[in-house]
Image: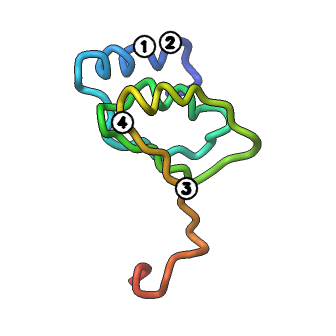
Amino acid sequence: NHREDGYLEPLREAAAAGQGADLVVEMLANVNLDNDLDVLNVGGRVAIVGNRGRVEIDPRKTMAKESAIIGVMAGRTTPAEKA
């Protein structure tokens, strides 16, 4: 629950132990993206599906884990992908 204080701590600990997230689907990137990078595994990805403003991140977090940030827009989905 992202509304609870300290909700990220167990996720950060898991990531530090090599058991972080392989994929985070982010619905509010302007608030959460920098924290998302903390909980990724090496080679993990963040798929941004929602955002309400500018984002500031520390790019070293992506470099250290060789992770990727991917923008996803459902409006670009082809009919074949929807099937």
Indicate left or right for 52 with 19 as reference.
Answer: right
| Dot placed on the residue nearer the N-terminal end, 3 or 4 | 4
Say what amino acid the circle numbered 2 marks. Answer: Gly
Cα distance in 3D space between marks 3 and 2: 27 Å
Q: CA distance from mark 1 to mark 3?
A: 26 Å
- Residue type indicated by callout 4: Glu
Q: Is 1 or 37 nearer to us in this picture?
A: 37
At mark 1, the secondary structure is helix
Residue that label 1 marks: 9
Residue lying furthest right: 53
Disc 3 secondary structure class: strand
The residue beneath circle 2 is: 6
Q: Earlier in the sequence, mark 1 or mark 3?
A: 1
Residue 39 placement (x, y as % from top left): 40, 26
The structure residue drawn at horizontal position 47% and vertical position 87%, both measured from the top left corner, is 79
| Element assignment for label 4 | loop
Q: How would you rate the neighbour count of disc 2 (Cα within 10 Å): few for under 14, some for 14-19, many for 20 or more? A: few
Q: Is residue 60 left or right of residue 54?
A: left
Please report contact status of discs 1 and 2: CB closer than 8 Å, yes or no. yes
Task: Name the residue: 37% across, 31% down.
Answer: 40
Residue, disc 3: 71
Residue 77 x %, y %: 51, 76
Q: Amino acid at mark 1?
A: Glu
**What residue is disc 4 on?**
66
Residues at circles 2 and 4 in contact by the CB criterion of under 8 Å: no
Distance between mark 1 and mark 4 Cα atoms: 21 Å
